[in-house]
Image (cartoon, helix red, strand yellow):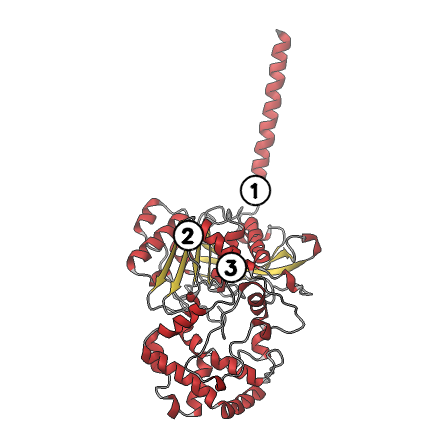
Amino acid sequence: MHKVLRWLLALAVFIGTLSSTAAGAATAAQSGPTDIKDRLLSIPGMSLIEEKPYPGYRFFVLNYTQPIDHRHPERGTFQQRITVLHKDTSRPTVFYTSGYNVSTAPSRREPTQIVDGNQVSLEYRFFTPSRPDPADWSKLDIWQAASDQHRVYQALKPVYGGNWLATGGSKGGMTATYYERFYPRDMDGVVAYVAPNDVVNDEDSAYDRFFAHVGTKECRDRLNAVQREALVRRKPLEQRYAQYAAGKGYTFDTVGGLDKAYEAVVLDYVWGFWQYSLLKDCDTVPANAATASDEEIWNSVDTISGFSAYTDQGLAQYTPYYYQAGTQLGAPTIHFPHIERTLIRYGYQPPRNYVPRSIPMRFQPYVMRDVDAWVRHHATHMLFVYGQNDPWGSERFRLGSGARDAYVFTAPGMNHGANVAGLVPDQKALATERILEWAGASSTAVARAKPLAGFDAGLDVRDPEREPALRP
């Protein structure tokens, strides 16, 4: 009996020791950094570039160490730029990317305003300065980019423990969709704006149908006439283009000459108008192209398309996009029935023409088919928003019988800046409700279906994400 009592006493002491050790460990964990900057910088691989003030938030520009190749992380790393708009670790977090560079100014995307949350923004790999050196371009693909997001999410989830939503517009909407396809367990919801979906790269008739009916006949006729007139007056306007380029120090080695660049800019004109303008803006287009001056034609094309777009200097920033368009994403080709064939020398040029020849490229037709099939059959907690008058919505994501709690909405009359606020009332309420539900908002907030934060003119982004030339 005494042995039993001694054994029970020893056991009690042992359990007490374990309890004390566990309590000590918990206390030590709680005594870690509490300031949000210190918590972020305690993440391995995270470093501070700068902190910028904004009322009601903390805003950080950071670098995060990423593997060049997520399949072989031992083969080198690069620094990827991210920003964090911090509100409170108890709030939901929106994970945003434009699919291009990241802005280093504080801004808030629409889902962030709706859920009144934090926002993590990521620069897409290979857009400078987030580019490995030397650059192995074969490591620029949608899986590697999705894996970048996955690692950032894993690093930040212990800090921001609430629900997470992925979002982005245009190429950023594509990026959010690809991330969900490869890592469907990371996010609690996805809001993808104006995301093109080029499933079959060589079949682009949907774009021709779009341009035959978009807007009004009067507006289409104005735009088509200016585009045609710019090709009729090719000789004098190219002379002006040469003077313009010489004055700016622009060159044309990548595209293969000024003539190719000029035609590319002119052929972007109608597309560029509908991508970034509204029907009411037709009043800014010359009413009679045949009698307009060279100055009027030049200014209209330059304002909408931008004569710097296909110079070496204009293309350099977007080499990663054109590389992806020519290897995985696909690119549209449209026809111009209002222009005589004798006026068009090259037509829409392939992405290969906009990437330096030193970078090898090979198109992979199965990549977009895989994503499209996954969305149709597996999309869950996903919202796609398109603009009625946006040409990029001609080939869009669609949902099949396997989708659950997923939606595709179109904002009437809107362009590439389409958003939830521009939807018809019933769809706007439903979209807002679903975003709040996915973000883990209270049942009362979900039922109200209103953004939890008021509009902030200095913070909230409302204009289309403008990328010059024919880019999503």
Q: Secondary structure at mark 3?
A: helix
Q: Tag 1: residue type?
A: Ser
Q: Label 1 neighbourhood size at 10 Å, few (<14), some (14-19), many (20+)?
A: few
Q: Is residue 22 above or below residue 369?
A: above
Residue 352 coordinates in the image, percent (x, y) = 59, 72
Q: Amino acid at mark 3?
A: Thr
Residue 387 horizontal side relative to residue 40, left or right: left
227 left or right, relative to 11: left
Give SS at disc 1.
loop
Position in image of residue 469 (x %, y %): 50, 75
Per the rendering, the mark at residue 400 is 2
Q: Is residue 225 left or right of residue 9?
A: left
Residue 394 horizontal/vertical position (percent): 42, 66
Badge 2 crowding class, 10 Å Cα cut-off, few under 14, some 14 to 19, many 20 or more, is: some
Residue carrying label 1: 31
Mark nearest the camera among 1 and 2 is: 2
Q: Residue at x 67, y 72 (%)?
A: 358
Q: CA distance from mark 1 to mark 2?
A: 50 Å
Of pointers 1 and 2, the one earlier in the residue sequence: 1
In the rendered image, the vertical position of residue 346 relative to residue 86, given as above or below: below
